[in-house]
Image: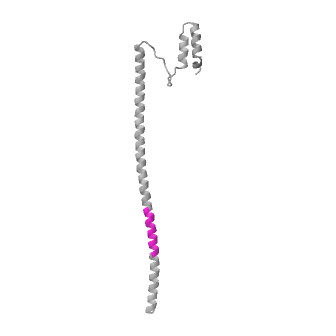
Amino acid sequence: MPTLEERLAAAEERATKLEGQLTTLQTENADLQKRLQAAETSRDEEQTQVTELQKQLKESRQEGQNLANKVKDLEANAKTAEAEAANICASVGVTPAPVTSKGDQTSEDYAARIKAAKSPGEQTRLYRQYKDKLSR
C-alpha cells in the first residue's frame, strides 16, 4: 500500500499532466475559434460578392432587354422613314434611287442609268462618270 506522500506525489503528477493537456486543448480550441471566425468572415465576403454579382447580372439582363427593345424600335422607325421618304418622293414626282445598307447606289443602279441614256454619247459620258463605281 502506497504511503500518503506517494499518493500525494502521484496526484500532483497527474494534476500537472492534466494541466498540460488542458493548456494544449485550450490552445487548440483558440486556434479552431480563429479558423472558424476566418471561415465565417470569408463566407460573409463571398455572400456579399454573390449578391453583388447577382445584382450586376440582373442589371445586365435588363440592359440587354432595353437594347433589344431599342433595336426593334429603330428598325420599325427605319421602315417608317423609308416609307415616308418614298411618299415624299412620290408626292413630288421623283422615283427614289435604291441604295445599299451603306447608303450607296449599287453597280446595277449605275448600269441601269447608263442603259437608260438615249444617245450613245450620253451613255459614254455616264460610263466615264460612273466607271470607278461600276467595279464594286
Query: Extreme top residue here?
Result: 119
Query: Residue 119 at x, y = what percent?
Result: 56, 6
Q: Quadrant of residue 89?
A: top left
Query: Residue visible at 55% across and 11% down?
Result: 115
Query: Residue 34 at x, y = what percent?
Result: 44, 65
Q: Main secondary structure of the magenta part?
A: helix
Query: Residue 8 at x, y = what percent?
Result: 44, 88
User: How many numbered discs sit on the rendered protein?
Assistant: 0
- Looking at the image, is 118 positioned above or below residue 85? above
Query: Residue visible at 47% across and 74% down?
Result: 24
Query: Residue visible at 44% across and 60% down?
Result: 39
Task: Work out which quarter of the rendered image holds the C terminus and state it.
Answer: top right
Task: Work out which quarter of the rendered image holds the N terminus and state it.
Answer: bottom left
Q: Is residue 35 magenta?
A: yes
Q: Is residue 58 magenta?
A: no
Query: Residue visible at 53% across and 17% down?
Result: 109
Q: How is the image coloured?
A: one colour
Which residues make up the magenta segment? 23-37
Query: Residue 63 at x, y = what percent?
Result: 41, 39
